[in-house]
Amino acid sequence: MLVLLKMKKIPYDECMSSKKQQTFEDQLLALEDIVKKMEHGDLPLSESLEAYERGIGLVKKCQNTLQEAKQKVLKLNDGNLEPFDNDSES
């Protein structure tokens, strides 16, 4: 079963100014926004460095979230990770 999620694009600045907890998806979208701005190539050096620093922080948060999710799956599966078989859903 293929599930597609429609994610609302949230700019990084708006994401960081919010007082509520960011979701994993919000963090990914903010990271995408940073990457696009940096790839465009018209940011001054100081803004590029700030964007890079924010991006690294988001990457670390996302990695931690994924690691926590992996640990939960391991716990639920008695320490075993089983490969996802996409063909069995057909």
Image (cartoon, rainbow, N blue to C red):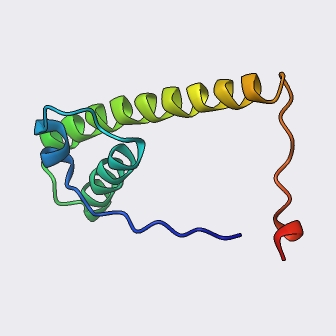
Residue visible at 44% across and 28% down in the picture: 60
* Left or right: 33 in relation to 25: left
Q: Residue at x 28, y 31 (%)?
A: 53
2 to the left or right of 56: right
Residue 21, quarter of the rendered image: top left
Which residue sits furthest front?
76
Q: Nearer the viewer, residue 9 or 43?
A: 9
Query: Is 14 placed left or right of 51 in the picture?
Result: left
Quarter of the picture holding the C terminus: bottom right
Q: Look at 19% across and 33% down and name the residue there.
A: 20
Could you tell me residue 78's position as x and y percent?
84, 23
- How far across and how far down the image is residue 30, in percent? 29, 49
Q: Position of residue 87 (x, y in %)?
A: 87, 70
Answer with left or right where residue 23 lies relative to residue 88.
left
Residue at position x 57%, y 25% in the image: 68
The quarter of the displayed image where residue 6 is located = bottom left
With respect to residue 52, does 11 lie above or below?
A: below
